[in-house]
Amino acid sequence: MTTQLGTESRPLRVAIVGAGPSGFYAADALFRSPLIIHVDAFDKLATPYGLLRGGVAPDHQKMKSVSSYYDRVATKFPDRFRFIGNVEIGKDITVDELRNYYDAVVFSYGSSSDQKTGLKGEELPGVYSAREFVGWYNGHPDYQHFEFELNQEVVAIIGQGNVAIDVARILAKTPHELSTSDITQKALDALSKSKVKEIHIIGRRGPVQSAFTELEAKELGELEDANIVVYENDLVLDGANRREMEEVESNKARKNYAVLQELAKMPKEGKSKKVFIQYFKYPKEITGTTHAESLKMDVVRLEGEAFKQKAIPTGEELTIPSGLIFRSIGYKGISSPGVPFDTKRGVIPNQKGRVTDENGHVVSGFYTAGWIKRGPSGVLGSNKPCSTETIDCLFEDLPSLQACPTPSSDAVYDLLKSRGVRTVSFQDWKQIDSRETEIGKAKGKPREKFTTSEEIFQTLDSVVEKGK
Ligand code: NAP
């Protein structure tokens, strides 16, 4: 007889691996059910919210306010949700071990690597992924050791997605503009001494194919001490590009184009810094012997029918002399031991969120959501329908789901404790949250983040000490 999961006597037990936005949306979808469900959301970091904390730009505080939604999910059924931070699945506990304690596991650990350009010179010092810079200024513990060459006057950013725009904006903002964000003090101090004067955002295609979105582009025209440079010549559209702009279902290209037209009319001089949106520049080499010295590009034109256009070199070249080059051409997921993985796409293979093996067969009890399910695309809110689709599959599968052998809430903690792993609970996080907010408030910032797990544990210990 199969055990009936989701009842008072035998709650459905679900582990979520990765407590970022898609993990919280998965918990949200689970808690919308009338079933009795216990959710443990694990994260490698000691803090929750994933990319919301470590990826969303520090000057986009409005977007960060979605954390209050996630808090409501975490506290909806306080005895049924646990955040278990500072636990690395595959290292502190294996996926097979998780199966002992949970009836279903949802992998929602995002994309923690990035695409490579394959350009000659990409491995030279002075060339970084945008992810590293973003992690650094956002206080992500894995990126605090980076020291970027902010003594350079010219910076090149390869790619024109919203991450590239974030990087350019943070480099272009004044200390005054950044002072009300939750950028780390260390990053603010380093950026305050920055010598950067020119920031080039490099697109290998044209304005219609820009990957960024309207609001993010608009913000570049509102910078206190940086001019934005968009060349009107780049905005002249031929038939194929006009068709691409008009035939795309979303209005993204049309909206972007309208913003670019406004930006092109803005004064190109008068402020200390300049942000160039460069189109039709195909990167071909990063030069340098012991350090990056320049980015070489072919100037290209697009040829062919709409949506099938190819970049053809015009014979002209452009070289941007720069010792600080970021590639910002998309993130990439990495595999987790014991979980099927599609190395080429950088995702966990799945059918609507049901994990599949190398033969395309569904792996019972394994689910996936967010960027590691569908690849690194979309805004934060895109994760909600993505996670809901996954949890709908889990509910459909419920009658055939194999009940785990050890449905104990304490057993997993005991195991982690026996391995010397110090975990962080949601209540612990709330203590950290209020301490970070308190320190930030004294500086006029929304928060000052702790950037290491040591700082977090010391803070938690001092709270316990004070309470004695
Ligand atoms: P993205 O939007 O996929 O943009 C990647 C960019 O890299 C594109 O311009 C692409 O150009 C270019 N590219 C790719 N391969 C290249 C190569 N080999 N050489 C030169 N250029 C290359 O990626 P992203 O910026 O990392 O953003 C990821 C997701 O997060 C997106 O959905 C984004 O909207 C989202 N995000 C949102 C926000 C926000 O809402 N404010 C902030 C940050 C990120 P082609 O089109 O020519 O391939």
Image: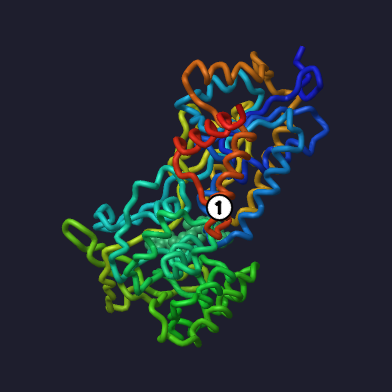
Examine the rendered structure and indicate whether residue 35 appears above or below residue 278: above
Asked whether mark 1 and ligand 1 are closer than 8 Å, the reply comes as no
Residue nearest the viewer, comparing 280 with 198? 198
Q: Which amino acid does label 1 sit on?
A: Arg
Give the position of the C terminus as an image quadrant.
top right
**Figure quadrant of the N terminus:** top right
Q: Residue at image x 55%, y 33%?
A: 85
Label 1 environment density (alpha carbons within 10 Å; few <14, some 14–19, many ≥20): many
Q: Name the residue under label 1.
A: 447
* 293 over 278 or under it: above or below: above
Taking the spot 70% from the left edge, 23% from the top edge, the residue there is 401
Residue 35 against residue 330 in the figure, above or below: above
Check disc 1 and report its element: helix, strand or loop. loop
Q: What residue is at 47 percent from the left and 25 percent from the top? A: 92
Quarter of the image for residue 301 reads: bottom left
For residue 87, above or below residue 269 = above
Q: Decide if residue 434 is on the left or right side of residue 339.
A: right
